[in-house]
Image (cartoon, rainbow, N blue to C red):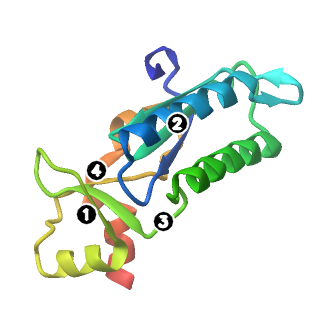
Amino acid sequence: MLKEYPDNAKVFVFQSNKFLSEEGKIAIEEKMLKFIEDWTVHGKNLKATYQVVMPLFIIVAVDESFAELSGCSKDALTHQIKEIGEELGVDFFDRMMVAYHPNDEEMALINLSEFKEKLQKDEIKQDTKVYNNLIETKLDLKQNWQIAVKDSWHGKLVSIL
């Protein structure tokens, strides 16, 4: 879905505070499909798509060469994601949850204070891959979404806590 979008497409990453069930994933896909079809800015349809990834993330991309997002259109997206979260009993806006790979096969999700403890105990290494959900473009998604702790905002934040 994202393949056809340019590298400068605006990207939003919403991370759940817990792993989603298959039923939850299906519910998200149904709601997001309808939302994307109807999503507009000043009466003009947006060229947008979404993906549910690793039953933890909702990624939304918008090609602003067709129509630029407005504050109202961003608010509509936020409202939609909050509504989905409420229906599924998850929070897509909990920035204190960290998704990372403790090894090549697994993915883990823990709160930032536990992440800090594991980092201090060297249970999580500086080269451990974390998800940087602050990315803004498709190019960022390809190059900077999964990055080493030492290069991430997580590592910087943990060092000042």
Q: What is the three-letter code of the residue carrying label 1?
A: Lys
Label 4 and label 3: CA atoms lie apart by 17 Å
Residue 105 locus on image (x, y percent): 12, 44
Label 1 and label 3: CA atoms lie apart by 18 Å
Q: Secondary structure at mark 3?
A: loop
Front label number (2 vs 3): 2
Q: Secondary structure at mark 4?
A: strand
Q: Secondary structure at mark 1?
A: helix
Q: Residues within 10 Å of mark 2 (few under 14, many from 20)?
A: some
Tags 2 and 3 touching, CB below 8 Å: no
Q: Residue at x 50, y 65 (%)?
A: 94
Circle 4 residue = 147
Nearest the eye: 23 or 106: 23
Label 4 and label 1: CA atoms lie apart by 8 Å
Q: Residue at x 55, y 35 (%)?
A: 60
Q: Is residue 148 visible?
A: yes
Of the two numbered discs 1 and 3 on the same chain, state the one appearing first in sequence.
Answer: 3
Q: Any mark on residue 95, and which?
A: 3
Tags 1 and 3 touching, CB below 8 Å: no
Front label number (1 vs 2): 2
Residue 64 locus on image (x, y percent): 68, 26
Front label number (2 vs 4): 2
Q: Is residue 66 left or right of residue 122?
A: right
Circle 1 residue = 150
Q: Any mark on residue 27, and which?
A: 2
Q: Residues within 10 Å of mark 4 (few under 14, many from 20)?
A: some
Tags 4 and 1 touching, CB below 8 Å: no
Q: Is residue 114 left or right of residue 91?
A: left
Of the two numbered discs 1 and 2 on the same chain, state the one appearing first in sequence.
Answer: 2
Front label number (4 vs 3): 3
Q: Quadrant of residue 154?
A: bottom left
